[in-house]
Image (cartoon, helix red, strand yellow):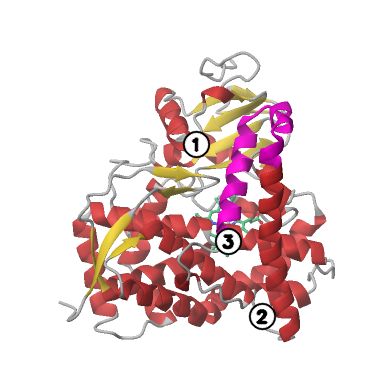
Amino acid sequence: KNAIIPTPRGLPIVGNGLQIPVEGTHQFFTDLAAEHPGGLFKLNMAGRHVVLVYDPDLVAEVCDESRFYKPIDPPLAHVRDFAGDGLFTARGEEEVWGQAHRILLPAFSQRSMKAYFPQMLEVAEDLVAAWSSRSDVDVTDDMTRLTLDTIALAGFGQRFKSFSRVSLHPFLQAMGNALTEAMDRTRQLPFVTGLKKRADAAYKSDISVMQETVDEVIRARRLKSDTSNDLLGLMLDAADPVTGGRLSDENIRNQVLTFLIAGHETTSGTLSFALHHLMRNPHVLAQAYAEVDRMLPGDTAATYETIMKLDVIPRILDETLRLHSPITAIGLAATTATTLGGRYPIAADQKVAVLMKPLHTHPSAWSDPDTFDIDRWLPAAKTGHHPHAYKPFGNGERACIGRQFALTEARLALALILQRFAISDPAGHRLTIKQTLTIKPQDFRLRVRARQDHE
Ligand code: HEM
């Protein structure tokens, strides 16, 4: 009674690889999912066969860590060219993954979020100061400045001061190029990549720019000989409680690079998408203003305690991550041969990917799935959710270590923006999406004006 996994028609050799558009990959997968209502389909991407899954019950199966693991395949295998054995791109069987995970876990506890709060506030105040002298702002770029500066300061004690630069930090240009190249290589047959000498030289030079930034961060810390307990402090000083091992210099470099990328790119996208949804949903925006005016009236200073008591803003973020999860898919592979849904055969090591948007809008788990509705996240409604229909932070032990960091930072940033500014969208922005490893709104500008008397 085995069933065949549906496969869209492909081209010889490259399979469906060439059909995948460079721009709009995310939309391509979302459309294919709509054409395959069974909850899964299979693609041949330049010779790699991947089963894409989005039915919540099937996703529950592939999220069972006794049956599926996180493989490091393209695109992550390419990201590994620069992130090495950092947490995000380390293989589960590498001892250093467990060591780094255990050493860094305390740095992501709720108590640590309280310790990072002053740094998060300092950078959020930089954003507010920059916006105070402008009326028309580039949302996506400024959210990127905010989140990059926040991870650099809270994680590594380094002030990037991105709001005093006209163009983005050179690290970002290099990172954007390198991530784009990593994604291009995912679509190419390896021999094609081998032929592209100029792209390869540019890739190597972008990787060195990123590594120089990282080396500078580590050098600055070593000079200061401070013993702060931030991410870098822990990596330099702490031993793994289980093996007693310490992280090598090479691994610390990979972790810093990983955190500079993983620690800002997704949070930036989330904040931009959140502002997009607020512009589209004036009644939710009004609720958010009402909350801020109640919790942070006038120019009351934001504290960690106030931010943790917010209710509307966190639900805006939850709902934003449902409709626009910056990481559009997570990759898994079968530990041993198995079946999905009791009928679809899956070979050992078969690659599987969970598609976020089709999962997060699956009609069996979500009513009125395309509507931005923050009331889905009220406590009473939340308990009724399918337990595997929402995975913006990934799954199991390889899930996002920075979740609380991202949510604390994003809550604070939104609260401060709404406390200080009336925001509007006179140009009637139409959402288009830019995709590298993650997605963000492209060319997204808004009008901001100081709220003088907190009407
Ligand atoms: C892993 C999402 C913010 C650090 C992941 C994964 C997802 C994710 C889906 C799993 C990827 C996979 O399975 O291949 C997000 C989202 C964020 C966010 C949506 C913001 C809204 C952050 C922040 C940090 C961070 C702020 C650091 C400060 C990491 C790391 C991993 C990871 C290190 C790898 C964990 C491991 O495998 O041990 N994230 N992330 N992320 N994230 Fe995040």
Q: Which badge, 3 or 1, is on the more N-terminal residue?
A: 1
Image coordinates of residue 115 in percent, x first then y, are 55, 81
Q: Circle 1 sits on which residue? A: 57
- Residue at the location (34% across, 53% down)? 444
* Quadrant in the rendering for residue 217: bottom right
Residue 93 lies left or right of residue 174; in this view the side is right
> Mark 3 near mark 1, Cβ–Cβ under 8 Å?
no
Above/below status of 163 relative to 44: below
Residue 393 vs residue 313: left or right?
Answer: right
Between the C-alphas of marks 1 and 2, the distance is 41 Å
Residue 73 seen anywhere in this rendered image of the structure = no
Q: Residue at horizontal 56%, vertical 58%?
A: 172
Q: Main secondary structure of the magenta part?
A: helix
In this picture, which residue range is highlighted in magenta? 171-200
* Amino acid of disc 1: Asp
Task: Tell me whether the residue at label 3 lies in contact with that at label 2, contact meaning CB atoms closer than 8 angstroms.
Answer: no
Q: In this figure, which residue is indicated by the disc labeled 3?
A: 170
Q: Tell which tag, 1 or 2, sits nearer the viewer.
A: 2
Q: Position of residue 79 (x, y in %)?
A: 67, 47
Does dot 2 land on a helix, a strand or a loop?
loop
From this viewpoint, which residue is outermost toward the right?
244
Q: Is residue 33 magenta?
A: no
Residue under circle 2? Answer: 229
